[in-house]
Image (spheres, rainbow, N blue to C red):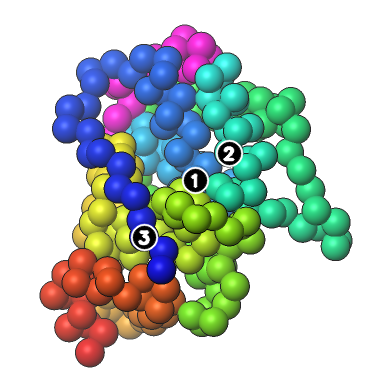
Amino acid sequence: MATLEQTPHLENLPPKYNRAYTARLLVHSFFFSQGSESLQDTILTFLVGRFGNNFDPQVINEAMEPASKAAYAIRSNERLHGTVIRDGIQENTTEEEAREELENLAIKLVAVLDEKDIYSQEGVDISGLTNGLIYIDISRLGPHPSAGGRRRQASETVTMYSDSYLSQWVFFGLMAQSTGMLEYDEMFAEVVRHFRLSSGDEEYKDWVDTSAQLIDNHLAHHPEQAELLPDWVTSQAA
């Protein structure tokens, strides 16, 4: 049975992000957006809206080299990254393509930083972020526990990064397990707060139904984690 390796929680947020830390934030945005460019853009606006003063545009550019190397290492490892099939043909990412992706992401991040005062004052689209995190999960995992999960090569040691059946919404969101980065912990905490406040509205019934599907899927492959669900989630599902 797969077990999940916990990453240490970061207790202190650095006042200014250095090159290595910025690179980690950028690479993790690929992990949590699960291949959705629009969701990744929404994640960037959240990071800037909440932590914009910690970013330095010059440091973002300096972070490209370590970030692109890390992204390529992940994308080329079939235990960590799902296989991409287009028109029946498997696509493999080159190192140059990984760097281009990171450079485009850096350009977007710097552009969003120019508008950070707007995001800080007017707020981030938490409803859109919540919607994106829920529905990207169900699209990647499938609607039923019997679905095949993400296309990843099997591994004897399963971590949160390589687990084909891990629901990010359930594990990091509802179960409040640490992502290993304070910024993303706060992101999941905030969307879950929004989900909880909105779940009684008929407008958001699909969120509740899809969340219940994701819980069933996740626990079918990780039954030992049922105790991590808070009481308000289990009572909602009853």
Q: Is residue 127 visible?
A: no
Say which quadrant the C terminus sits in: bottom left
Q: Is residue 25 above or below residue 66?
A: below
Kindly indicate whether the residue at mark 1 contacts the one at mark 2 (C-beta within 8 angstroms): yes
Residue tagged 1 = 31
Residue tagged 3 = 3
Neighbours of disc 3 within 10 Å: few (<14), some (14-19), many (20+): some
Q: Which label lies toward us, 2 or 1?
A: 2
Q: Which label lies toward us, 3 or 2?
A: 3
- The percent position of residue 96, horizontal first and vertical second, equals 74, 26
Q: Residue at x 33, y 18 (%)?
A: 17
Element type at marker 2?
helix
Callout 2, which amino acid? Ile
- The percent position of residue 75, horizontal first and vertical second, equals 63, 40
Is residue 9 shown in magenta?
no
Q: Which label lies toward us, 3 or 1?
A: 3
Give me the disc on residue 74. Answer: 2
Is residue 62 shown in magenta?
yes
Q: Which comes sooner in the sequence, label 3 or label 2?
A: 3
